Amino acid sequence: MFGDQGRVIASITLRATMGRKRALLFAIPPAILLLVTVLLKLAHSQDTSWPSQVVGIFGFTVVLPLTALIIGTSVLGAEVDEGSIVHLLATPVPRSVVIGGKYVVAVVLTAAFVAVPELLAGLIATGGLTRLAVGLFVGALAGSVMYNAVFVMASVMTTRAIAYGLGYVVVWEALLGNFVSGARLLSIGHYSLSVANGIARDGSGLDPGVGLGTSVVMGAIVTALALVIAARALASFSLKGDAI
Amino acid sequence: MTVIELRNVSRWYGNVVAVNDITMTIGPGVTGLLGPNGAGKSTLMHMIAGFLAPSRGGLTVGGTPSWHNPGIYRTLGLVPERDSVHAFLTGAEFVTASARLHKLPDPGAAARRAIEMVELTGAQDRKISTYSKGMRQRIRVAGSLVHDPEVLLLDEPFNGMDPRQRLHMMDLLHGLGEQGRTILFSSHILEEVERLSGTIQVMVAGRLAASGDFRAIRRLMTTRPHVFLVRTSDDRGLGAALIGRPAVTGVEVTDHGLSVRASDYGTFSREIAALTRDAGLRLRELLPEDESLESVFAYLIDTDGPKAR
């Protein structure tokens, strides 16, 4: 699948995404996470309860989804807004390769801007390469994979992907997910926490509220489904006329 | 030799009909799609290019539908109206990327050939952000030509070009048409379409208003009824004299003068001065009331069916 066409798409997507002004926004949430972590470490270096709350729960319910949202809607959505997507689509490239190439770039960027900072924050907060730190890294990677599939799909289907994405993250995951146990079963944030918890082991303070097995299966289904829907929606991509 | 076939193609958005029951065949050579802004030209081009589904009707390019058919782009190139290339790419990078996406066996060579065709070889290693508007247009044409398509669609390709750039682009398109490719371009300027096209398809308000070569279209425009505003020292008296002339089909006395409908522009223009003099009147003002292209277009859709063939 990733022949030369996929490489061209990924390369141009990466350059285009990093070249836009909104690329600065990728760095802000992880920067805040690292800053807060460092400050808390200096103030409460003996306390062991805050790392899972701050780096774990805050990181996974705020930093991870928001950064993934900006990145995931940028790799395709920005080209749709600009119109440059037409040059890509007016070629025989299979639409699944277009989605695949852009999705991979989104996952790699989110891994760089969230998973790596999560690892660093975990190292700083827990004082070393603990199970928690590694768990947070892997959980964030899983989150990158799942969130970006959903956000790339959203950006094909609507021009208001960022608004819908925010609605999903803030209302569904953060609000309902924390108070309604049923909502957690359909929450990527909680799947990611569950993966992190699986490595960090129970007692880590992460409290995912969803089992590891369920999370992995549901996460895989959500990811695959989102990417398939995205490719099919892209096959029906339409340009409107100038008068409309 | 690839032919674009449309049969009863319509496209609507809710209550708005953008393209209304169009049947046409576009063959090799250059065809111009002429019409005022909002006529539905872009909508039609997007449907032919596979970027919009018809609401009704059959549309094929070389015998296969273009909708839901990425394979069609092996033989089709599109230069959309909106200029939206990634400006951080150099000209060469952009065209080479297009060649690679088309899985050409030697993308670099194909890109060089295409860039040579649009005469941008000297600028190919500069970023597109440094290009002038005309150069950006040409590099987009190169990108759409790199895979040697049988069909090329260009949406308002001359927009914003100066006369020299326009001439150059016309020469390029003319040459491509001579090679037997099927070229369709749209414009709202008659002169552009006349110079370049073998066949002209006129679109007004979503419908196909007229079809033919440029002479036929010109003839339509000069033989249509014209309306003039005439002011003299005795409008009513002149009106009485005019209604007897065969070239005049209607006369109306209004506050601002005499509104005269003439079926034959040429004859009327020759006769009006002599008529006023013979009637002993002073001709104060003679103005055509409907010289705009829009009024021509309006005339063309006034009756059923396309006019010229």
Image (spheres, coloured by chain):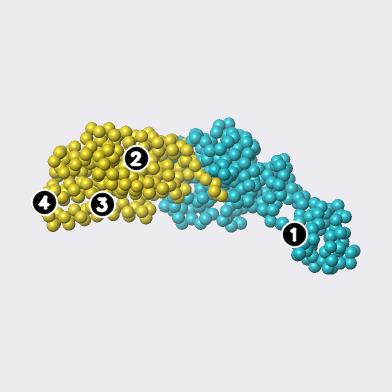
Chain colours: A yellow, B cyan
Looking at this view, is A79 or A241 the one in front?
A241
Question: Which residue lies under the disc numbered 3?
Answer: A30
Do circles 4 and 2 both sit on a common chain? yes
Question: Which residue lies under the disc numbered 1?
Answer: B288
Q: Nearer the viewer, mark 3 or mark 4?
A: 4
Instruction: Report the Cα–Cα distance between label 3 and label 1.
Output: 69 Å
> Could you tell which of marks 2 and 3 lies nearer the N-terminus?
3
* Disc 2 to disc 3: CB gap under 8 Å: no
Looking at this view, is B303 or A93 the one in front?
B303
At label 3, the amino acid type is: Pro
Residue in the image at 18% along x and 53% along y: A37
Q: Relative to residue B276, is residue A4 drawn left or right?
A: left
Instruction: Report the Cα–Cα distance between label 2 and label 1.
Output: 63 Å
Residue in the image at 77% along x and 62% along y: B254
At label 1, the amino acid type is: Pro
Do circles 3 and 1 both sit on a common chain? no
Question: Which residue lies under the disc numbered 4?
Answer: A47
Question: Which residue lies under the disc numbered 2?
Answer: A149
Residue in the image at 33% along x and 36% along y: A223
At label 2, the amino acid type is: Ala
Residue A218 is labelled as: none
Can residue B76 be seen?
Answer: no
Instruction: Report the Cα–Cα distance between label 4 and label 2.
Output: 37 Å
Q: Chain of mark 2?
A: A
In which quadrant will I find the N terminus of chain A? top left
* Disc 3 to disc 1: CB gap under 8 Å: no
Q: Relative to residue A164, is residue B273 drawn left or right?
A: right
Q: Is residue A47 above or below residue A181?
A: below
At label 4, the amino acid type is: Asp
x and y, in percent, of residue A28 in the image: 28, 54
> Could you tell which of marks 4 and 2 lies nearer the N-terminus?
4
Looking at this view, is A168 or A34 the one in front?
A168
